[in-house]
Amino acid sequence: MSVITLQVDGHDVAVPAGSTLLQAIQAAGLSVPTLCHLDGLDPVAACRLCLVEVEGSQRLLPACASEATEGQVIHTDTAQLQGYRRMAVELFFAEGNHVCAFCVANGDCELQDVAVAVGMDHSRFPYQDPQRSVDASHPRFSLDHNRCILCTRCVRVCDQIEGAHVWDVAERGSDCRIVAGLDQPWGEVDACTSCGKCVDVCPTGALFAKENTTAEKHPHPERAHQLRRAREQQQWIR
Amino acid sequence: MDTMTQAPLPAQAHAQAQSSTLTGGPGRPRLRLATVWLAGCSGCHMSFLDLDEFLFELADAVEIVYSPVASDTKIYPERVDVCLVEGAVANVDNLELALSLRQRTALVISFGDCAISANVPGLRNLFSSPGRDSARTVLERGYLELADATGQLPHAPGIVPELLPRVLPLHEVIPVDLYLPGCPPSAERIRAAIAPLLVGERPRMEGPEMLRFG
């Protein structure tokens, strides 16, 4: 196994060739905020929270989807990155209808967590108040589009782990949304096995079990990684 | 658009601007504190009352010059040092009070999620369509569509405040100096935000104990 050496915030680290910058950051004992990234799922670099600066590069790179290369010098927590991250989180809040007070995920929500992590105390962007719907057609689960941040974890876990590919992304821009099947009510999609993995990995209150009311959702995002490790490395452990 | 610049601390500004003719500790005038209730459920004020015995310390350290829970004054006074503003800006009365308190207050605090994000009162913003703003939609729904045959829209200028087309966070109406999130902010969080102000320091609003919404 060949090894890549690079520098993260002044720390020298060595990681296996093929590692991502995010893995190199973690190997250095550091962290960057993430939302769309989830161990066990392929990266999509949708949320842009894990952007880092790479010396010699004009553009910022998403750590989750960028391969570490030999001799790289990266910075994860500059004033510029802090500013962009906070701006990105404010845009998430302004773009949807994220009212924490009566959300199923209140208190156990990754969007709330990153808001704290980036020091967001208010949104400088005006709230868009989009008119979105709730799909409660499935017998066990619901999808509240108001609280969706389009991280596509549900799309990926259903495709890559469950193999059912119920979810997709439709439309563009502010009309962009998650759809079930061929843009059908979720409950009418035969491909859905009702396994609940999408609910487990959803970082917000967008996907939830019907028995959960305010602050009662406690997701299990670690399950994607557990299942992938079990299948690929035969390590059937929690 | 950056509203994160720091305002001068009221205790310091006040001490410089005035000789210490007010009562209070040696050399330090008592802070003139106001609390305001705009479009909110009053839960933030209830949480404020949950400060329990700290309220006695607060009563010694500040002069409460305007508050729905601790004062009977009807007109927002001049020369206020700190104002906690609960609630969003939903009607013309809210707007008028927000504008006047800004002119008369050194440090304005958005107190709770409704002031910061419009939160639950802001949900009516979702019910708008071209040519029909959310105020009109909810009024027609409440007073005409669901009424019996005698339904009519409320109209009493000067008595019943007109709804604004959209419910707004406070900082979209006036500059805000400090944000105290929570629905409601816990008494511990309120105390941690207020206590430094009493000694002329700015609270450190960071970490889940101070910043988490909801």
Image (spheres, grey):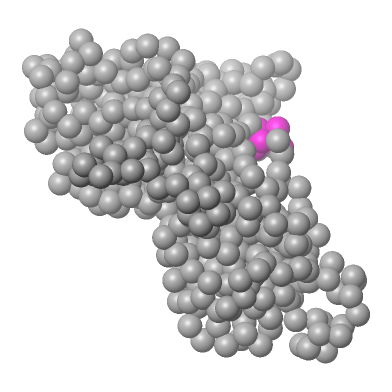
Inspect this view and state whether residue A121 appears. no
Image height check: is A144 above or below B82? above
Name the residue at 22% across, 18% down: A180
* Residue A79 colored in magenta in the image: yes
**Front residue of this view, candidates B85 and B9:** B85
The quadrant in which the C terminus of chain A is found is top left
Name the residue at 23% across, 49% down: A213
**Front residue of this view, candidates A238 and B32:** B32
- Left/right placement of residue A119 relative to residue B30 reads left
Inspect this view and state whether residue B14 appears. yes
Name which quarter of the figure residue A185 lies in: top left
Magenta stretch, residue numbers: A78-83
Q: Position of residue A17 (x, y in %)?
A: 49, 19
Name the residue at 67% across, 67% down: B76
**Front residue of this view, candidates B116 and A150:** B116
Q: Position of residue B145 (x, y in %)?
A: 25, 37
- Left/right placement of residue B173 relative to residue A36 reads right
Name which quarter of the figure residue A145 lies in: top left
**Front residue of this view, candidates B80 and A34:** B80
Q: Mostly what secondary structure, the magenta segment?
A: helix
Q: Position of residue B39 (x, y in %)?
A: 48, 54
Name the residue at 34% across, 27% down: A132
